[in-house]
Image (cartoon, rainbow, N blue to C red):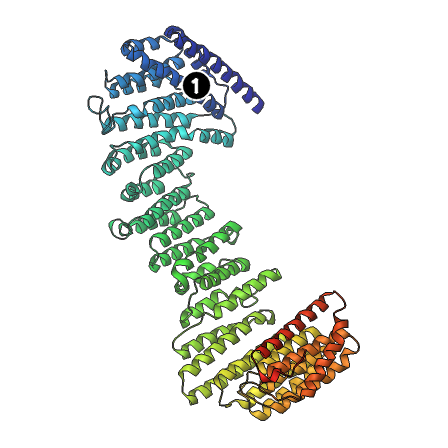
Amino acid sequence: MEEDQEKYLEDARKVVKEQAYFMRASLEKAQLKDALRYSSAMLSELKTSLLSPRNYYILFMQVFDEMRILENYFKEEYRRGRKMPDLYESVQHATYVIPRLYLLITVGSVFIQTHEIGAKVILLDLLECIKAIQHPLRGLFIRYYFLKLCKDRLPDTGSEYEGTGGNIDDAIEIIIRNLSEMNKLWIRMQGSKDKSKRERERLDLKVTIGENVTRLSNLEGVSLDTYKTKVLPKIIDIITSSKDAISQTYLMDCTIQAFPDEYHLQTLQELLKVCTTQLEPTVDIKNIFINLMGRLADFALNNDMGTFNSEVDIYSMFKQNIDKMLDSNSQIEFKNLLDLQVAFLNFTLRCYPSNSEYVNDILKSCCRLCERQNETDFTEECQKNIVKFLAMPLDTMSLSILTMNEYPNLMKHLPFQKRRQVAIKICQAVVNLNQVIDDLKITGELLKFIQPLLITQNDYVEIPENEFEEEQQLVARTVHLVQNGDLAIHNTILQQFIAKFQQGEITRQKYTYPAAIFALFRLIQQIAAQGGPQTQETQYKVLFEQIRGLIDVLQGHFPELALKLNLNFLLCINTVDQAQEFDEFSYDVGTQIITIFQDEIGDSNVKVVLLNQIMSTFAKLNCISGENFDTLAGNATQQAAKLLKKNEQAIGVLNAAHMFYNEHIKNVQRVQECFKKAIKIANQSIGNNPKFVYVFIQILNKYFYFFEQVEFKDAEIQEVIKMINEKLPKALSDNDEQSKKIKILWTATQELVRERKRRSIQAYQQINI
């Protein structure tokens, strides 16, 4: 029970603390015999079998800290003249074996530093002595203590202990022997009867084993050659002979993490061979491969890539061994194999970013793996992996990945929602990379793969409206990336998109058709910049009719959208048809705009906004003949006079003046008629609400706009000013928001007149406001 463990640990730590206190007190009095007695009592707590591995480790570390004090005292004793052989001999008289060996290791570490006896001799002697402890937990920790105290006393190359104390081969042999014995003890650990808990307890102590591998990797004398010929073969032998999955997994990971990446490059075949042929079936080989690939990929990015392309064929080594795993009858789960494939693809893309052949080979392997699975094997996690697998190459290889013949074979294993995810990722990659779409074949493949976003397929699943809108906007953005210097090919690519959009429903066409229409607008302008008049006319006619057809589809469901698209359509025609070759066609588009406005737009506020857009668009047109334009502008003016509110009518008619006087048309009479009609409507409205005086202020400002181009009667202007002066005080009597706006507008108007007078502009000299 956990409560019992806490009590056992507390009791043991209390004894350690107490005996350590007496030990230190004895050392201060130079009473070594008593100090050794108290230290033996303290160390005896490590004989316990009551503590769990985790709690034993806590107790060990407390003892370890106290033993450092004793070690330092031994050093001082040596400096004061005590003979180390005598001390080495005396600690062996301790009553119990556990305290005796801990004390022996402590003295031995100091003995080595005296150089009286070679390091190799003492270290090997200590290894022989600690063989006496065969209890897994106690034996593991006493060897851990040996390693901690003696790790800096090894006869490493260049160390003070090299020479008479041994050489690098001896240092390697000592650590390897310790690792081998510790690994055996670790495997023998029983602990809890529950298997999963027992495995957790073992893993709690894995750092004690890994310390050996770390120490080996830190030896100065372990060169690449030494690693290949002496270190790695011995580690592999320990790993493979253990026949224990936990041990094999951990030691393989330790080896990968501890030694330099350059060493792994030169010994990769040996490592991979061990993984695929010599480990226990339950070892998670997938994670070992993933860790190794991660290390090597990081190394490749931070160093010369030539190593990967010439010296060692890293890709082929991984590919051969992974394929062996895929083709074997092993018990590796489908999900784990997919994880491995994803990691391998990621590794390949990082190390060989431009090698499409490698990517295609991995795609083939993954397809082969998927094709031999049952439908029930494709769990959610597996599907996510396939999505990731399909999307990853897009960032580095862009749309060229879509031409690989295995790509669709892999995608067919996914249900709609996952195919949709892949389609979204493809679109995102294209848009984020600003990838130009200029190839007919790739366009066909792209449309095939994003089909889940374009049409409702048999296994379609409804998605939230906001997600639907986001995905359709993403599709729309891809159309604007179509580009090719050959405008015929450019048009063919656009037609591929449009043909696919036409297979979708109106809910999708709401987003895709406008994108296609604007893409056609851009194409038309490019044709105008390149082609001859006869060629242009033929092309324009076809494209204009297509655009009108697309807008007509939208009109029945989204009249406001159709109206705005028609306005842009007119502006497009206007940029390429100054000769009015398509006068009647443009007139029909304009008429359609007025018809939609009149018959299909009901919201009065929307009508005000749209009418302003219609008039401002008409004012820019030069592609319609005078007679036809006059009819359109007249119809727009009539619509202004039919707006719901009188003030809106007045301002609408007033704004209509711009359609009759601009850079293309100078019809003074129609401008004057617009002002007269606006004043008449304003007079009718102001009696009901003095705040409608702002309409007269706007009329006055519009007079000023046309002052230097159109001649107005002074009496008309003075009448407007008189009306403003009469109604303004009452309009400003309230302190509401509308009154504040009127005051701001009137102040600005007065400042305008004063500024024009200062500039001595004759027309303003008679204006008094």
**Residue occupying image coordinates x 24% and y 32%:** 221
In the image, 680: left or right of 572?
right
Q: Position of residue 72 (x, y in %)?
A: 35, 16
Q: Is residue 739 above or below residue 338?
A: below
Q: Is residue 260 above or below residue 677?
A: above
Query: Residue under circle 1?
Result: 63
Q: Is residue 140 above or below residue 762?
A: above
Q: Is residue 555 visible?
A: no
Quarter holding residue 331: top left
In the image, 80: left or right of 693?
left
Q: Is residue 34 above or below residue 163?
A: above
In the image, 623: left or right of 393?
right
Of 166 and 728, nearer the camera is 728
Circle 1 residues within 10 Å: few <14, some 14–19, many ≥20: many
Q: Position of residue 575 (x, y in %)?
A: 49, 82
**Residue occupying image coordinates x 38% and y 15%:** 70
Q: Position of residue 189 (x, y in %)?
A: 44, 25
Of 77 and 158, nearer the camera is 77
Q: Position of residue 390 (x, y in %)?
A: 44, 57
- The kind of residue tagged 1 is Val
Of 677 and 754, nearer the camera is 754
**Residue occupying image coordinates x 46% and y 45%:** 333
Seen as rendered, the residue at the extreme bottom is 627
Of 147 and 618, nearer the camera is 618
Quarter holding residue 769: bottom right
**Which image quarter holds the N terminus?**
top right
Q: Is residue 205 visible?
A: yes
